[in-house]
Amino acid sequence: MPAELTYESTLRELATDRGVLRYHEAGEGPPLLLLHGSGPGVTGWRNYRGNLARFAEHFRCLVLEFPGFGVSDATDEHPMMAAGGAVVRFLDGLGLGQVDVIGNSMGGIIATQVALRKPDRVGRLVTVGGIGTNLFSPAPGEGIRLLAEFTDNPTREGLVRWLHSMVFDPRTVTEEMIEERWEQATDPGTLASARRMYGSKAMAARAKAMAASGEPPYWAMLHRLKAKTLITWGRDDRVSPVDMVLVPMRTIPDVQVTIFPNCGHWVMIEAKSAWESAVLAFLTRKDDL
């Protein structure tokens, strides 16, 4: 990563009527919005800092920090409920109409929901694991269960177990990664927000509410998705098992799927070069005549 693309040099703030949204900006060209996933100590910068330089050669990259994860101002909403509104406020605040979007895990779900509700705002869509629904594998996946255990009882050992569930190669989990994640994950405000999402009581309540709801889940509406879509996945994902891809692969009208071997949930980190090449080929491809 070029020296100039540091955390400090790329950090920006956008004041909105729901608090300050913080983001990282790099590059020039068509706008590319990057949305992070969830989990202890997550930030958009940590998800995408290794990819930013390469994408910034082609796009104006905007890495949004969702409210409720310790960087942007929190709202009184559940973090997943706040995320979609934050995306629209962010685009409106920057005066952006349609953008291409990359979303990792939760970020992919949010991007898909925005694309379904406001199809004029999302051009091309790239997801990294996470969308769809378990068909053959148990739900929730191993990584989600470990996430709930850590959230209920935040210990360093629990954090390390969860981090190892996110990757195929355990060497990906460095001491630096553990320390920076631990510092943010145990911040009282961030931890309280995480418990609203992934505490065992919160997850049980959400499952009960979904069972009682008359509204279809977002993945049942993917046939209405207008955005050209690239789904990327790690074959060895223990958070969102790869069988989840089957429903979106079949139902999204204009979709392609790339699965990376020897790779867990963080495809953009573990399969960095191959993933970047696949995503750039998709985003820069001229539409067929």
Image (cartoon, helix red, strand yellow):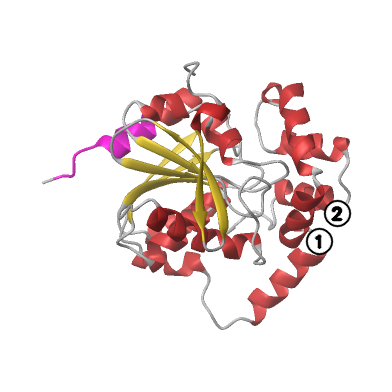
Crowding near the residue tagged with mark 1, few <14, some 14–19, many ≥20 C-alpha atoms within 10 Å = some
Crowding near the residue tagged with mark 2, few <14, some 14–19, many ≥20 C-alpha atoms within 10 Å = some
Q: Nearer the viewer, residue 165 or 111?
A: 111
Q: Amino acid at mark 2?
A: Asp
Q: x%, y% of residue 176?
A: 73, 23
Whether residue 188 sits left or right of residue 116 in the image: it is right
Q: Is residue 177 magenta?
A: no
- Find disc 1 in the rendering and name its residue: 200
Q: x%, y% of residue 28?
A: 32, 32
- Give the residue at the far top of this rendering: 3
Q: Nearer the viewer, residue 79 or 254?
A: 79
- Residue lying at 31% horizontally and 30% vertically, measured from the top left: 58
Q: x%, y% of residue 94?
A: 38, 50
Q: Amino acid at mark 1?
A: Ser
Q: x%, y% of residue 78?
A: 66, 65
Q: Is residue 285 magenta?
A: yes
Number of numbered discs visible in the structure rendering:
2
Position above or below: 243 against 61: below
- Residue lying at 34% horizontally and 53% vertically, measured from the top left: 95
- Mark toward the start of the polypeptide (1 vs 2): 2
Cβ atoms at labels 1 and 2 below 8 Å apart = yes
Name the dominant secondary structure of the magenta segment. helix
Span shown in magenta: 277-288
**Whole-Å distance between the Cαs marked 1 and 2?**
7 Å
- Find disc 2 in the rendering and name its residue: 152
